[in-house]
Image: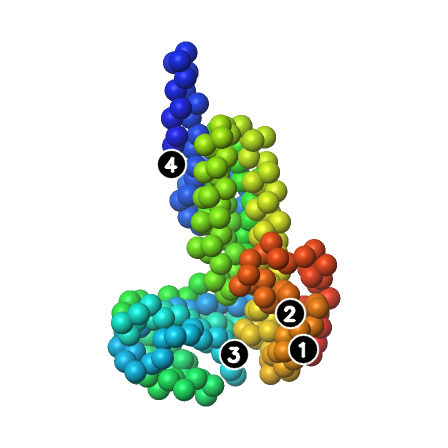
Amino acid sequence: MEDRNVGPNGHGGDQAVGADGRRSVTRRALGITLERQPETSYIAGLLLDGLRGVSDDHDVLIGEDDRLFLLFHQGDGRARAYVCTGLSGQHRFAGRDGAVRFLEACAVSGYPWSEQVVTATPAGPCATYPGDDTWCAEPYVDGAVLIGDAAGHNDPIIGQGLSIAMRDARTVRDLVVEGARSADAFAAYGAERMARMTRLRFAADVMAATQAEDADNRDARRRYVNERVASMDAAVFPLILGIFAGPETIGDELLDPRLLDSIRAA
C-alpha cells in the first residue's frame, strides 16, 4: 500500500506499508532483518464440509496421545480442523492420501462428534506448516513500515495471525493519518509490536511444549499444565488466559523460561 500526500509545494510525502506476507518482497527490498525461532512442532490444517448433526455452539481444543486436535466451526456444516504434532509429524499428512490420514488423526476419544469429523468431506487441500516464530526488531524505515506476517509471524499453534495483522493495521493506520512518515515516527509501533510478539511467542512455546512437542512424558506435561489452570495458578492461568484475552494482559513476570523447563520435566 502506498499513501501519496502531496503538499502545496509539489513534493510528495509517500508512505509505503508492506503487507505482503511471510516472504515479503517489501521487507527484503528495504533491507529489514527477519529473526526466527525454529519450530518445535508442525500444524496441519484441512477445511471440512458435511458436518451434519455436529454441535457448532462451541469450538474444540483437545490434546490426546501424540497430537493436539482443534476444530473451528464456520456454519452450515463447515469447519476448519487442525492437528498439531511434534517434529516427527512433519510429513505425516503428506502425499496423495494425506487428507485421509489427517481425518483418521481427528479421531479423539474426548469429542462426542469425532466420528462425524472423521467421515467429513475435505473441502480443500491438506497443508502442513512449521510452528516457527519470526519477528523484526524494527519493522520500519523512513517512508516504509511493515505489518502482519511481513513484519513477523507468531507460531500458528495458538492461532493469533489475523489478530496480529488487524492490530498492526489499526495502529499503523492511526499513525499514518496523524502524519507519520519517518522511522522515528514508527518507533513506538515497533516497540509495542515487539512486546506483543514476545508475549505471544512465549505463550505459543508453552502450548507447544504442553500439547505437541515430541515427548515420552506428554501426558504428564498436560496434567502439569491442566492442574495449574484448574487451580488458577498465578504463574500459568493468566498466561493461558492471555491467549484469548490479548497479549497486553500477560505481565512481564509471566515470561519465565523456568515454566517451560518445569513442563518438559513433568
Q: Residue at x 46, y 43 (%)?
A: 170
Residue 259 percent coordinates (x, y)? 70, 68
- Local secondary structure at mark 2: helix
Quadrant location of the N terminus in the rendered image: top left
Q: Amino acid at mark 2?
A: Phe
Q: Residues within 10 Å of mark 1 (few under 14, many from 20)?
A: few
Marks 2 and 1: CB-CB under 8 Å? Answer: yes
The residue under label 3 is 63
| Disc nearest the viewer among 4 and 2 | 2
Marks 4 and 2: CB-CB under 8 Å? Answer: no
| Disc nearest the viewer among 2 and 3 | 2
Q: What is the distance, in whole Å, between disc 1 and disc 3 at their CAs?
A: 19 Å
Q: Is residue 41 visible?
A: yes
Q: What is the distance, in whole Å, between disc 2 and disc 3 at their CAs?
A: 17 Å
- Local secondary structure at mark 3: strand
Residue 153 vertical position relative to residue 98 in the rendered view, above or below? above
Q: Residues within 10 Å of mark 3 (few under 14, many from 20)?
A: some
- Local secondary structure at mark 1: loop
Could you say which is closer to the camera, residue 53 or residue 68?
53
Could you say which is closer to the camera, residue 152 or residue 79?
79
The residue under label 1 is 231
Residue 103 percent coordinates (x, y)? 36, 79
Q: Earlier in the sequence, mark 4 or mark 1?
A: 4
